[in-house]
Image (spheres, grey):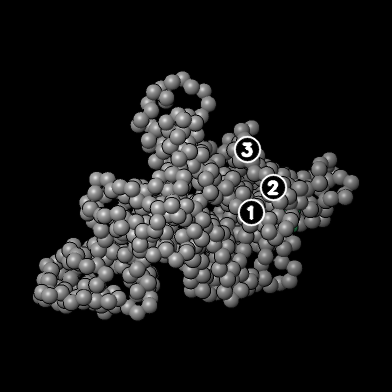
Amino acid sequence: MSIRLLPPNLVNQIAAGEVVERPASVVKELVENALDAGAQRIDVTLRDGGRALISVTDDGHGMDREELALAVERHATSKLPGDDLVHINQFGFRGEALPAIGAVGRLAITTRQHGAEHGWRLTVEGGEKSPIEPAPTNPGTRVELRDLFYAVPARLKFLKSARSELNAVTEIVERLAMAHPEVAFSLSDDERNILRFHAETTDLIAEAEGARLKRLSAVMGRDFAENAAPVEAIRDGHRITGFAGLPTLNRATASMQYLFVNGRPVKDRLLVGAIRGAYQDFLARDRHPLAVLFVDCPPEDVDVNVHPAKAEVRFRDAALVRGLIVGGIRHALTGAGHRASTTVAAATLQGFSAQSMPSYQAMPMRGPSVAHLAAQAVAAFAPLDPELARPSVRAEAAPETTALRDYPLGVARAQLHGTYIVAQTADGIVIVDQHAAHERLVYERMKDALAATGIARQALLIPEVVDLDQPAAERLLSRAAELEELGLVIESFGPATVVVREVPALLGATDVHGLLRDLADELAEFDTALSLKERLEHVCGTMACHGSVRAGRQLNQAEMDALLRQMEATPHSGQCNHGRPTYVELKLADIERLFGRR
Ligand SMILES: Nc1ncnc2c1ncn2[C@@H]1O[C@H](COP(=O)(O)OP(=O)(O)OP(=O)(O)O)[C@@H](O)[C@H]1O
Ligand SMILES: [Mg+2]
């Protein structure tokens, strides 16, 4: 057998295997090219989910005749002026997207530079280039790809239904649109309008943040924009910005987490792990926060050349980036104080209306339902100002008149079912789950104490002997030193048994057996990648749950008010350690609506 060089079209088809997986990857390459060309508006049109046609039209700088001829040559790019793969600021640099696309479908490019008399058109079918002809067209570039994979039919059968290909395209366009609020985008499929984003003004620096939030709100929905805290963290030339959703706004999957590195959408495990770490003591393991983060760093500190479709990146200092993200998100959530998301109240109202007013829903009414109106009204309310929670609130009940005005969580009026505190605020009512709230307070105090002086321990009068299984006992004992730092002193007592000598003083009288079993389970599930501190915090959470006021305990007025004041003064108190809300607020206006008074 002799060695031979592969013909260029075969080389392009092989490259296409990496770059062009499905319609969404074609759209990604073409839209990135349009962005690189400085487009202000980009229109994407599909037929049959992209199988029959993918067309991307931009108003960018266009190409002249020579550039057009080169654009479809392999390894031809205008984006690496020097021969240096270190300073990559644009989406493109490999110079292989267009030739790869032209090798697997019928490609047509029509382009005109601004100020040129007319445009030029070139087609590539199965790798065969047509002569370049003059063509009438608007300034900018239109790239059309018909009959995707007609030249490599084997790959057609890997395509999914038109609907799921369209979904993948939609996601790509959304991601790119999030990073470029100043550019208008549209997407349609078989004449059906799928996405339409107007360009947001970003002329002033002050406008840029607002424009970004408007675009994020257009893509992710108003709930996110209204229930997210701004993130900003800078260190050593690395900057993290974006928005972190409040923990009470969570999902069953991580699909609402969007990450961008130097404006490039990425799906990077390091970054996903960092978000997980940042939220891990606010959310149950099977719930996922919503977040949009933009990492900006000098191009030489990140390698975007590790993945053919540029979906993954590699950071020179991964630990720095991870630390910035974890710190930035936590800081943002602390700034959000005791806020729980407005969606909680909206969901509550919806529940109320659904149950108590079936007759309304049965009526053949046109227009939005009462529940919908109420939910909208609630969503429109400005979140509580975290500064209100700051003043030196302490654990005593204040005089009635000032209290209503000054305290966001109001004055306690009653305890119901031994579990819920009902409080009156200046313009509504607040219902608090006392166990969930107290758990969070104990937890935050443990974390503070841990950071400051270590946690005070309390020796048990009679040490408790706890029977476990052997692996559980071993897991606990292997962490004995860390647990001791948290105030829990244990020793071995036979192969499957441990003896507990001291417990954290904060916990008071607690069910030691339950605590140890839960801790053993926790340790079994811990991700080894978590840092020691994060592990400790998680353990705090488990301990706090055991030490907090059980549902069912009667509280007097002073105790209830004390709990409310502490919540106002404590960061993260709007949710328990599992991301469930600790309180729900209903505004008078909404309650009036429920009763048809408005
Ligand atoms: N929409 C467009 N407007 C103006 N010029 C374009 C456009 N699309 C492509 N080009 C030109 O064609 C060249 C080749 O594009 P292609 O996508 O194949 O490679 P690239 O973007 O340079 O790198 P990569 O393969 O990483 O995407 C680009 O470098 C650019 O000069
Ligand atoms: Mg490109």
Is disc 2's CB within 8 Å of ligand 1? no
Q: Is residue 193 above or below residue 17?
A: above
Q: Secondary structure at mark 3?
A: strand
Q: Earlier in the sequence, mark 2 or mark 3?
A: 3
Identify which amino acid the numbered label 1 is placed on: Gly
Asked if disc 3 and disc 1 are in contact, CB closer than 8 Å, the reply is: no
Instruction: Answer yes or no: is residue 429 visible.
Output: yes
Measured along the vertical axis of the image, is residue 528 above or below residue 292? Answer: below
Residue 505 x %, y %: 24, 72
Q: Which mark is residue 308?
A: none
Q: Which mark is residue 188?
A: 3
Residue found at x 57% / y 38%: 49
Q: Which residue is mark 1?
A: 210
Indicate the position of residue 73 as horizontal and vertical percent values: 72, 57
Q: CA distance from mark 3 to mark 1?
A: 27 Å
The residue depicted at 53 percent of the width and 37 percent of the height is 162
The x, y position of residue 580, in whole percent, is 36, 52
Question: Badge 1: few (under 14), some or many (20 or more) residues near its Cα, within 10 Å?
Answer: some
Which badge, 2 or 1, comes first in the chain's sequence? 2
Write down the residue under mark 2.
Answer: 199
Dot 2 alpha-carbon crowd within 10 angstroms: few under 14, some 14 to 19, many 20 or more: some
Residue at 64% from the left image edge and 32% from the top image edge: 191
Of marks 2 and 1, the one in the foreground: 1
